Every structure is written in structure tokens, then in C-alpha cells.
Amino acid sequence: MKTLSVVVPAYQAEGWIERCVDSLLVGADDLEILIVNDGSRDATGAIADLYEATHPGVVRAIHKPNGGHGSTINVGIDLAQGTYLKVVDSDDWVDPEALKALLEALRGLADTAEPVDLVFSNFVYEKVGRRYARAVRYRNVLPRGRVFGWEDVGRFRASQYLMMHSLVYRTDVLRECGLRLPEHTFYVDNLYVYEPLQHVKSMYYLDVDLYRYFIGRPDQSVNEAVMIKRIDQQLKVNKMLVDIEVSPFDVPPALYRYLLHHLRIVCVISSTMLLRSGRDEDFARRVQMWQELRYDDPLVYRALRRSAMFQIVNLPGKPGRKVSSAAYRGAVWALQLN
């Protein structure tokens, strides 16, 4: 059995998939690369087949009808043979030296009576046109270089949260929790982070800048114009997160605190995109979204509304909306977001 399975969701990726896969091949002795071709109409499938032919036993080319990002991850989870699993999108890549360090750490963590459930590492925003890349690290939140539990986890800053790029789950955790991401839906990475966390008991933080998150292309799903166009899918994922029942009496306090933090960020993004669209019907949907949360889960609503983020995106009246929009633009610039 390989230590790590890397799932590479690939759709119309002929222009960048080689950079992604080449960065992973440095760990070829101890990982498998599952290129899941999601019904691409370009040369993505042929490139995947070529990698499989030239790297037998390491690269597997999997071809399926188009079902969206979530469906490719579902297939990867089903077929993975590694003890641990990581998703690397085809337009992103990893740092080779950090990958070597990750594999070394995973081998040690897997070779125990109770393998660690989740390994964290850092990710870096590689934004088009920016001279300096911004790294997201967790040194202020997570203990470094040792196995720990939720009782050791600190408080995440407002601008600091977990993304799929940060996580390496033990494969059986993903299977045993029954994670199935919706098809033909963007932004499912939030579900990938949020849902399995409740089944994680032991963790390890490897403080290396592993994942290089490439942003800035106008056609990317996280581009503001694209997000507004696909707001229904953002709201769908938002509602699915809200509907996952989490009681503060059933999970460790630090886990509950983080889940609220993550949900707050997703709700703020949804609320801001509805505001930024400028459409009256979207403003009405924005009001409805918060009202539904208030009535469906008053405890969560009260917890979210106490935050500064909630206050900023829910300032009253047209002047308030302008301030909220300006604050969002400032955050996008400061954090180098898309």
C-alpha cells in the first residue's frame, strides 16, 4: 500500500496539468496519482493516459462523464489505495521539497497502532500579476511537530481558515464518515473541509508551504464575477453546511468553535456576493438567507452575529451596503484574493 493517494480533478486542463503532475512525481516511490478526467473535450485525457503509460504503478488515468469537481473527488476517494489522501487541483501544484517532508512525516504517522486522522500543512496564494505570494500558515493555532487533539487547538484569526489545500485526511476517515460531495456543483471544497472534521480525533501539523494555490485567471470559480454568476451553487453549499447538525455538547469546544468560524466565513462570502451582484432580487435573497438561519438555528445565528465580520456585511441601508462593499474590496486586495 502506498502512503499517499493524490487525487487530481481535471477538466479542460491541458494548459496546466503537466505542471501539477510533474510536481507530484518527486514522491513517486511512495504515492499514487489519480488523474480523474471529468469528461474533458481537450487533450486532458490523452495527457493523463500518457502519464499512466510512462509512470506505471504511480499514475492512474481515470476517465468519467462530466459530473463536476465534487464527483471527481468522490471517485478518487472510492479508488484510492493510499493510507492518506490529498486533493490537488489540476491548475495548482506542490512544492517538491515540502512534498518529500510530508511523505516522510506520513510514513511515521501511519506506522503506529492508531494512525493520525488528519495532517495539516500550509498553502500559498500564487496570484497572477502579484510579485509576492501570500502564505497561509497555522503556527499561532496548531502545535508543531507532534500529534495532538482538539484540546490543543487554539483560535483561528478572522482571516485564517482551513481550505482543502491545507488538509491530508486519513483515507478511511473520509470513507467512514460517508462523505459524498454533490455533483455539478462548485464550492464543494467547503463540505470537504467541514463534514469530515467531526470524525477527526488525532492531528499533526507539518509547518511547510506545500500547496501552491494558483489564482487570478478570469475563468476561475473563485473569480468574483464567476461567483456571482454561480451564486445558486454557492448558496446550495451554504445551505448544506447549515443543515449539518453540530451540537456544542457533542464535539470538543475547539472543534465547535472552528466549525462556527468556518460557517461564518462561508455565510459572509454568500452574503457579500449577493450584495455585490447589485440585483434587487439578490438583495432579497440575502435578507432571506440570514432570516432562515435565524429561525432554523437561533443558537448558531446568535454566535455568528456577534462577530465583526457579520456586523460589517450587514450594515443597514444603502450607505451601509456601500461600506460593506468597500470593506470587501479592501479585504480582497489585502489578502490577494481573486
Image (cartoon, grey):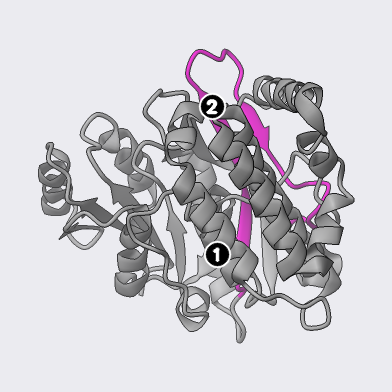
Location of the N terminus by quadrant is bottom left
Q: Position of residue 3 (x, y in %)?
A: 43, 67
235 lies left or right of 134: left
Which numbered disc covers residue 338? Answer: 2
Q: Position of residue 175 (x, y in %)?
A: 45, 78
Marks 1 and 2, the one that precedes in the sequence: 1
**312 shown above or below 249:** above
Residue at the far bottom in the pictured view: 113
* Label tally: 2
Q: Position of residue 70 (x, y in %)?
A: 38, 58
- In the rendered structure, which segment of residues is drawn in magenta? 116-144
User: Looking at numbered disc 2 in the image, what kind of residue is underneath it?
Assistant: Asn
Indicate the quadrant where residue 243 lies: bottom right
Q: Residue at x 51, y 29 (%)?
A: 224
Q: Nearer the viewer, mark 1 or mark 2?
A: 1
Q: Residue at x 50, y 36 (%)?
A: 212
Residue that mark 1 sits on: 240
User: Looking at numbered disc 1 in the image, what kind of residue is underneath it?
Assistant: Met
Q: Position of residue 45 (x, y in %)?
A: 13, 46
**1 shown above or below 86:** below
In-front residue for pair 4/15: 15
In-front residue for pair 143/273: 273
